[in-house]
Image: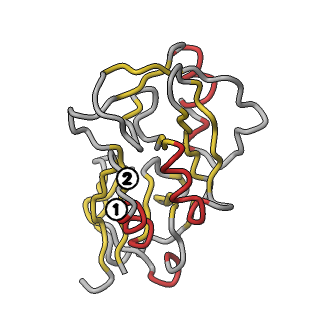
């Protein structure tokens, strides 16, 4: 079993998008709220985005409004919908030419094996990140998209299963970047 960190590709050939009303929308929706598991659908209004850097169409464009937030094209949403069901909120972004959706991952699981993970720690003792991930296999089995806790804080990174990655790749979706962070065999 493998776990991958999901990111938008930073390959310069792909388009990137940005918030039209950055200050207002970042504060209202992204600054604190996207890193929580509190639903946003009830407060979500029209969030306008535009193409910041032209390039090839991407099914997962880099979103400079909040880089930890995955943004999917309509096609990517169709391909991954079975993996997303009951795990995320799909929030529409208003782009002048394309249909894009911010993916608010609501599935946060306490799945870190603290005995095997290598954790980055400040001199104050505050644990701030991971140098090496280790997961509790039973807790990630059957989980296809999720975020994790470090102690009592939900991390912003989004993780996906091998099945999610394979669905993206076998359907020819572009603009996704997958970084392997854990293999249960190693």
For the N terminus, the image quarter is bottom left
**Is 49 positioned to the left or the right of 8 in the image?**
right
Residue drawn at x 55%, y 34% as measured from the top left = 99
Residue drawn at x 63%, y 38% as measured from the top left = 91
**Residue 123 at what x, y percent from top left?**
28, 48
Q: Is residue 7 above or below residue 31?
A: below
For the C terminus, the image quarter is bottom left
Q: Which mark is residue 58?
A: none
Q: Which residue is mark 1?
A: 169
Q: Which residue is mark 2?
A: 173
> Do residues under tags 1 and 2 come within 8 Å of each other at their CB atoms?
yes
Residue drawn at x 46%, y 19% as measured from the top left = 50
**Residue 148 at what x, y percent from top left?**
49, 60
Q: Secondary structure at mark 1?
A: helix
Q: Secondary structure at mark 2?
A: loop
Q: Residues within 10 Å of mark 1 (few under 14, many from 20)?
A: few
Q: Is residue 35 above or below residue 183?
A: above
**Residue 144 at what x, y percent from top left?**
51, 68
């Amino acid at each position: 079993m493998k776990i991958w960190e999901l990111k938008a590709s930073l390959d310069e050939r792909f388009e990137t998008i940005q918030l039209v009303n950055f200050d207002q929308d970042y504060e209202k929706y992204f600054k604190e709220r996207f890193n929580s598991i509190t639903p946003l659908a009830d407060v979500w209004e029209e969030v306008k985005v535009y193409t910041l850097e032209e390039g090839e169409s991407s099914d997962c464009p880099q979103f400079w409004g909040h880089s930890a937030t995955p943004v999917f094209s309509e096609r990517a949403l169709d391909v991954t919908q079975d993996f997303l069901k009951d795990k995320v909120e799909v929030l529409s972004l208003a782009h002048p030419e394309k249909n894009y959706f911010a993916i608010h991952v609501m599935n946060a699981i306490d799945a870190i094996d603290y005995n095997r993970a290598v954790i980055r720690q400040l001199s104050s003792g505050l644990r701030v990140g991971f140098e090496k991930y280790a997961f509790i296999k039973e807790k990630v089995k059957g989980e296809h998209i999720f975020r994790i806790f470090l102690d009592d804080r939900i991390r912003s990174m989004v993780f996906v299963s091998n099945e999610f990655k394979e669905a993206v790749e076998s359907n020819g979706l572009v603009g996704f970047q997958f970084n392997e962070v854990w293999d249960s065999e190693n």
